[in-house]
Image: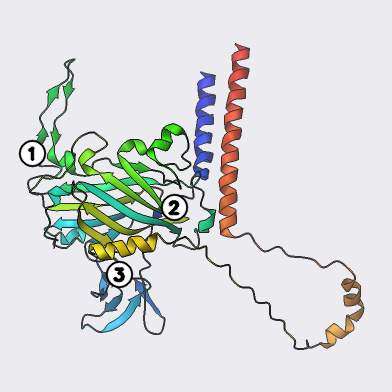
Amino acid sequence: MKLKKVLAAAVASLLTVSALAVSASAAIYVPNAEVTDENGNVLGTLDAKKRQLLDGETLIGTLSDDNITVVDTDGNVIGKCAEEQPAPGLTIDANWLIQLYNVGNEAEGKPPTDYGVDVTKIASLTAYMEVVKGANEEYAIDLDLYDPSIDGFGGSFIYSANGGAIGSQSDSPAYKEESEDEFGNKIPAVSMFDKYNWPHNEWWGLPEEGDSPEGVEAGTNTGTIDYGKKLHAEYIRKFAYSLTYDVANDTSGEDMVWPAGGECYQVGLQEWGGDLALNLKIRAFVCKDIDGNVMLAFDGLGNKVDETELNAIIDDLSQPYVPAAPAEEDTSEDTSAPETSAAEENNDETTSAEANEPAATTAAPASSSSSTNTGLIIGIIAAVVVVIVVIVIIVVLKKKK
């Protein structure tokens, strides 16, 4: 019994310190929605989903069709967002979620959407994305400190259909009736809603240069992507990747192509790290049919693009990574003669004596990037120490028996 308690405590400690080692994972990059007027005064932060600038419940302004300018109720420009905001139909928060078809839901901030395509023909989804420095400077780490073996990435392709013929959680037709297995055990019924509303399509890790499904068996892969989940991942260049989810050949082995007759069809990507040190920035999202033809494509802000525009985005993403240039130091010297006060003249002897002592140096405070990286290393070392302690405890307790 004592052994179990010791092990439980040790495992809990191990999980705690191990969490430190993956604290620098990514969240979806959210465009800065702070609104300022022409004089640089901050008016507030836009509710990007509602496309409104609010003061409590009072409407101050509305986001215009250019997705960056904010206008008042008379149509006068009152300010601009710090960055271009998502187009109508796209939500960017913990998710990057785009509406492909929707009858409209004002309460959820989802406008009526119809691109005139048969969404039941969508067979694969591809996200083109890059790792970028976290948008929040307080928590961000330098991009060059990213270590794919430590900084964990993972999430899910969001793929959902509901309403209409598919139904809701409380009222949905059966996809599979209740049945029994070969041993007489009951297999619960599955509704259409359960089948097609948020199926599990997880992805974990990102590939590194040279990685491939074949490299899994050969042991040559250096990235952390799991190729065993019907997921096609490609390394585009340093910090840039594509992930493709094969809808028509889902991880469950079942055909997950949407049925007709729903009222809401939406797709996107989640990242479950939820940390602000690094962000995943979606640059393009593509829906293809079973033959690989592009049915719908969007840029990272949810604007529909044609194939020429899509290829231009991919070409831009494929350009070699160039590290940010270090900030230039001010090397100019102040040549003006310092003024000498009477008090300083009276202290000539003291300052002369101090001049013969070695100059003291003040170390600059460590940057948040360095401290974050050090914390990760400490977390890993602590985890290893805990494992060793557990082994020693087990050996000692067994000898006492």
Quadrant (top left/top right/bottom left/bottom right) for the C terminus:
top right
* Label 2 sits on residue: 275
Question: Spatial distance from mark 3 to mark 2, Cα to Cα?
Answer: 28 Å
Q: Could you tell me residue 220's position as x and y percent?
A: 48, 37
From this view, report whether residue 338 is shown above or below residue 193.
below
Identify the residue at image location x=68%, y=77%.
331
Ranked by sequence position, the earlier of labels 3 and 1 is 3
Q: Nearer the viewer, mark 3 or mark 1?
A: 1
Identify the image quadrant of residue 39: bottom left
Q: Residue 246 carries which label?
A: none
Q: Could you tell me residue 385's position as x and y percent?
A: 61, 34
Applied colour scheme: rainbow
Question: Spatial distance from mark 2 to mark 1, Cα to Cα?
Answer: 39 Å
Q: What element carries label 2?
A: loop
Question: Spatial distance from mark 3 to mark 1, Cα to Cα?
Answer: 42 Å
Identify the residue at image location x=22%, y=82%.
75
Neighbours of disc 3 within 10 Å: few (<14), some (14-19), many (20+): few
Q: Nearer the viewer, mark 3 or mark 2?
A: 2
Identify the residue at image location x=50%, y=27%.
8
* Label 1 sits on residue: 173
Residue type at the position of mark 1: Pro
Ranked by sequence position, the earlier of labels 2 and 1 is 1
145 or 180, nearer to the observer: 145
Marks 3 & 1, CB-CB < 8 Å contact: no
Residue type at the position of mark 2: Asp
211 or 74, nearer to the observer: 211
* Label 3 sits on residue: 56
Q: In this view, does 341 lie to the left or right of 393?
A: right
